[in-house]
Amino acid sequence: MFHTGLIHWLPLWCHLGRALEAARPVTSPGIPTLVSLPWGSDGFIRHAHGIDSVAVQFTDAFLQPDLPTPQVSERRDPDPSRMQMPQGNPLLLSHTLQELLARDTVQVELIPEKKGLFLKHVEYEVSSQRFQSSVYRRYNDFVVFHEMLLQKFPYRMVPALPPKRMLGADREFIEARRRALKRFINLVARHPPFSEDVVLKLFLSFSGPDVQNKLKESAQLVGDEFVNCKLATRAKDFLPADIQTQFAISRELIRNIYNSFYKLRDRAERIASRAIDNAADLLIFGKELSALGSDTTPLPSWATLNSSTWGFLKQALKGLSVEFALLADKAAQQGKQEENDVVEKLNLFLDLLQSYKDLCARHEKGLLHKPQRALHTYSLMKRPAMSAAVQSREPESVEQLESRIMEQENAIQTMELRNYFSLYCLHQETQLVHVYLPLTSHILGAFVNSQIQGHKEMSKVWNDLKPKLSCLFAGPNSTLTPPRSPQDGVSPH
């Protein structure tokens, strides 16, 4: 039955692949054109002619081999022309998904655990393709790096870190955290403002001692993005008049997209898990056949009536265990491929959307209300202070009051400018999320390709296994005949 199911499922997955190609989104203003999915005549995604938009560029982000450690002088910077603002309104971004993915590919691999004084700690090897570097980092190094990003870029999407290791954390938890750290650092390394900041370069290439202090020192030397951006004080001039309405609509849209992709990720995890469970069941099935064929318990002659049928059956069953082991291996490969190519891409997209939601929450709860609170406090303080100064009639008191009022007004003006700059950055981050939206096609393409490839390989093994069943009916004095398949014209009923 399972073999027959594969025969029926394979054409359906191939048809779905072609339907996915026909249904690719139409280009709209501000959203990059999606390169066509390279489907072949047999329904498989070809690794040529446009595959960089579907599989190679993104899959390489997860499957690149370990990179060698070069000298410091070998650092590579991306093409400066890609980092320039577009002509005209600097609020508008000109990046495409392919350009973002090409900025860097960072690998995060586990290093064997080292014992400390009390507890073991986990260390990671972080390799950057852009800087041609390989450094060792601990989880606390990621924490300090994350804090410096929030300090320097409070108005940008800073992805969240996975939770800190808890007592009794097992290998599954450690592996899940490694994957999450890899997604985090790749999102950061491909983010336009982050990718050009010295903090990122230090984290990915500094191999000296005490990287945490080095990161803190570099962040203390300069202010945040508002202080260093030449356009910060003029951000209001570039914002559309209906920016608040656009912000509300975009936030609702991205919230809905997040909710749907969260459910898709859960289902993809279950599909991959079922493939791995299926592999385990097939392996056990084959081992039981082998154990049955290897049984050495003697049979009494009165039970077999001097027939050697059971001996032939045992020999045949023992030989079939090899095919079931191969089936188990194919099913496990499909499950792992779905975890790496589908589930991880969905998690990466969800991490990005969650960082946008976090940014919106920071904007509303903190940055947006600060000027209002400051104005309220200033109005409550100003009138009593002026009355007291007038009553005292001392020049020094009046001058001190005027100085304090000027300081308060300057602080409020700076808060208002920061609020507009926050909206400016939020508008750009919204564009950045939309640049990542074509990733949906990459995910669906990887999912369909995984199903087609997995069903095709499994179907081939089942087809190779079927003729070998004839040996089960070839024993002496056997009157049994192999069962016929549905293709032989026999009704299933």
Image: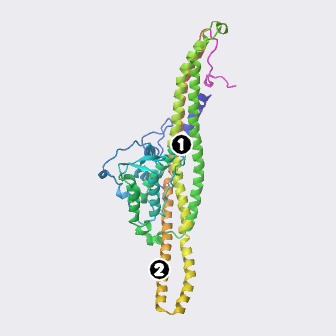
Q: What residue type is disc 1 on?
A: Asp
Secondary structure under the numbered disc 2 in the rendered image: helix
Residue occupying the point 48% across, 44% down? 37
Q: Pointer 2 and pointer 1: residues touching (CB < 8 Å)? A: no
Magenta residues, start to end: 477-493
Residue 484 magenta-highlighted: yes
- Could you classify mark 2 by the number of other residues whose Cα lies within 10 Å: few (under 14), some (14-19), or many (20 or more)? few
Q: What residue type is disc 2 on?
A: Glu
Quadrant of the drawing holding the N terminus: top right
Give the main secondary structure of the magenta stretch.
loop
Residue 347 place in picture, x, y as percent: 53, 48
The residue to which callout 1 is attached is 170
Count of labels shown? 2
- Residue farthest along the front direction in this orientation: 117
Would you identify the image quadrant in which residue 324 lies? top right
- Could you classify mark 1 by the number of other residues whose Cα lies within 10 Å: few (under 14), some (14-19), or many (20 or more)? few
| Chain-order first, disc 2 or disc 1 | 1
Residue 403 place in picture, x, y as percent: 46, 84
Whether residue 460 appears in this view of the structure is no
- Residue farthest along the right direction in this orientation: 493
The residue to which callout 2 is attached is 407
Separation (CA) of disc 2 from disc 1: 55 Å
Residue 171 place in picture, x, y as percent: 52, 42
Would you identify the image quadrant in which residue 466 lies? top right
Viewer-closest of 374 and 144? 144
Residue occupying the point 55% across, 82% down? 381
- In the rendered structure, the answer to whether residue 52 lies left or right of residue 346 reads left
